[in-house]
């Protein structure tokens, strides 16, 4: 959530940033929020004045009663009752103003960092790196969904029978390579200094609000109505919420956590060729990395996280590129995002497999996640970051397609063989 000080003290910057993020009538929305804030301050002042007057009158009544001036005390009591009615009205008015102001505030996305390029669509993103790994496919190359069927390692139709579209069943070597990828990613994260967390995969509304999924993405999350719980869209949500309402010290930085979880996304409105096979699922596995840093170090951490995710792709011997997202293509929470995309040779398209983002104070403000600043001895907001390291479906799709042989077999990258226990899927 944006800070009021950002909207008040950097209004023109905020308008430009929100417009870059695709917010319509950004100036009018900021003006409305600031008007609510002025009204809130005015009501708060009147409320405090009435409370002070009521408290003073109550004290005077006690003195009058002690001195025997019952008539004067009774007259003053009538005035106190009037003050109490006014206080109740002001409290209700303040509550209504704060709710309306908060509703507007939480509807606004994060402001983009000045380094974020302008643009509205993926075509406006900037490619900042692309490795030169070339893939030579056999002439009879197949997309991964055909390979999965011929090798009997992923059954999309069976998943559709059990649950519905977007819930595949992994079988035999398909299940083993899934488990191998998870363990590989977790081991690599541990070697990079991340503490492994195994969090719940159901969250309450406070957790969804804290990391910005609610109210923005409510329709995209699976909801357990009877218990008022949500299935997580990513491990970022429960892992980051570990630090909700926490005050850290500067010595705690950087906090580096990782976690494997299944992820659940309704992906309402998704259709067509881009959702075929493993390209877009309702349930998938992912290893997530999360950092909580000092504000002065968050962009350094973002570059480190991007570099780390790239090492995973290099070890898997995948052709990949790094894309800096434009303002209009970034997520609601993000101030700056790098996407990692792998080349799917059989589909002849780039598949996003990771987003690494700096949220600055946007999540921390919602979470009330602060640290004690040594120099000022005051509590300040932390910066939060997260990234996929990595999401499995499109990694597996790319591995299958890019490593297929003329015989229809799939070679396993050397780094993964100790985890799979086999070098080829036949």
Image: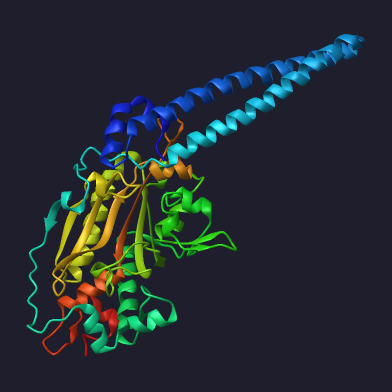
User: Which quarter shows the C terminus?
Assistant: bottom left
Relative height, residue 217 to residue 88 (above, below): below
Which residue is rendered at x = 63% and y = 22% of the image?
47
Q: Return the residue nearer the eye: 228 or 53.
A: 228
Examine the rendered structure and indicate whether residue 316 appears above or below residue 38: below
Q: Position of residue 154 (x, y in %)?
A: 31, 82
Q: Residue furthest right?
A: 68
Quarter the N terminus occupies: top left
Residue 6 visible somewhere in the drawing: no
Instruction: Give the residue at x 33% y 27%.
Output: 11
Image check: 379 left or right of 419? right
Q: Position of residue 300 (x, y in %)?
A: 25, 46
Q: Is residue 349 left or right of residue 287?
A: left
Query: On the image, which quarter does residue 383 sit in?
Result: top left
The answer to which of 349 and 175 lies nearer the viewer is 349
Indicate left or right for 131 with 60 as reference. Answer: left
Q: Position of residue 424 (x, y in %)?
A: 20, 86
Q: Residue drawn 27% across and 73% down? A: 276
Q: Is residue 223 above or below residue 324?
A: below
Q: Nearer the viewer, residue 158 or 381?
A: 158
- Residue 423: percent from left, percent from top: 21, 85
Query: Quick check: 29 left or right of 73?
Result: left
């Amino acid at each position: 959530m944006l800070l009021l000080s950002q909207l008040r003290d950097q209004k023109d910057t905020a308008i430009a940033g929100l417009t870059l993020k695709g917010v319509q009538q950004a100036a009018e929305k900021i003006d409305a929020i600031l008007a609510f804030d002025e009204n809130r301050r005015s009501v708060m002042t009147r409320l405090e004045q009435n409370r002070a007057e009521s408290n003073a009158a109550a004290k005077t009544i006690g003195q009058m009663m002690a001195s025997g001036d019952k008539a004067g005390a009774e007259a003053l009591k009538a005035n106190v009752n009037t003050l109490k009615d006014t206080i109740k009205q002001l409290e209700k008015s303040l509550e209504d103003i704060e709710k309306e102001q908060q509703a507007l505030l939480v509807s606004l996305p994060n402001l983009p960092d000045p380094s974020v390029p302008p643009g509205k669509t993926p075509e406006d993103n900037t490619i900042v790196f692309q490795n030169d790994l070339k893939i030579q496919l056999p002439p009879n190359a197949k997309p991964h969904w055909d390979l999965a069927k011929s090798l009997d390692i992923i059954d999309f139709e069976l998943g559709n029978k059990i649950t519905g579209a977007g819930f595949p069943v992994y079988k035999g070597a398909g299940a083993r390579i899934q488990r191998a990828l998870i363990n590989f990613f977790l081991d690599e994260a541990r070697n990079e200094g991340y503490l492994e967390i195994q969090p719940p995969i159901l969250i309450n509304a406070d957790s969804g609000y804290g990391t910005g999924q609610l109210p923005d993405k409510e329709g995209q999350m699976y909801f357990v109505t009877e218990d008022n719980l949500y299935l997580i869209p990513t491990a970022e949500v429960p892992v980051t919420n570990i630090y909700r309402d926490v005050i850290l010290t500067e010595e705690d930085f950087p906090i580096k956590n990782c976690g494997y979880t299944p992820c659940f996304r309704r992906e309402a409105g998704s259709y067509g060729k881009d959702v075929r096979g493993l390209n877009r699922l309702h349930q998938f596995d992912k290893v997530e990395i999360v950092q909580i840093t000092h504000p002065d170090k968050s962009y350094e951490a973002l570059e480190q996280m991007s570099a780390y995710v790239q090492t995973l792709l290099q070890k898997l011997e995948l052709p990949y590129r790094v894309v800096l997202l434009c303002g209009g293509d970034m997520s609601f929470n993000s101030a700056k995002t790098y996407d990692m995309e792998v080349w799917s040779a059989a589909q002849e398209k780039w598949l996003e497999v990771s987003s690494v983002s700096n949220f600055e104070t946007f999540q921390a403000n919602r979470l009330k996640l602060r640290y004690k600043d040594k120099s000022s001895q005051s509590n300040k907001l932390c910066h939060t970051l997260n990234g996929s390291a990595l999401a499995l479906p499109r990694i597996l799709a790319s591995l299958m397609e890019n490593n297929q042989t003329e015989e229809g077999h799939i070679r396993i990258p050397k780094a993964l063989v100790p985890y799979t226990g086999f070098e080829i899927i036949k």
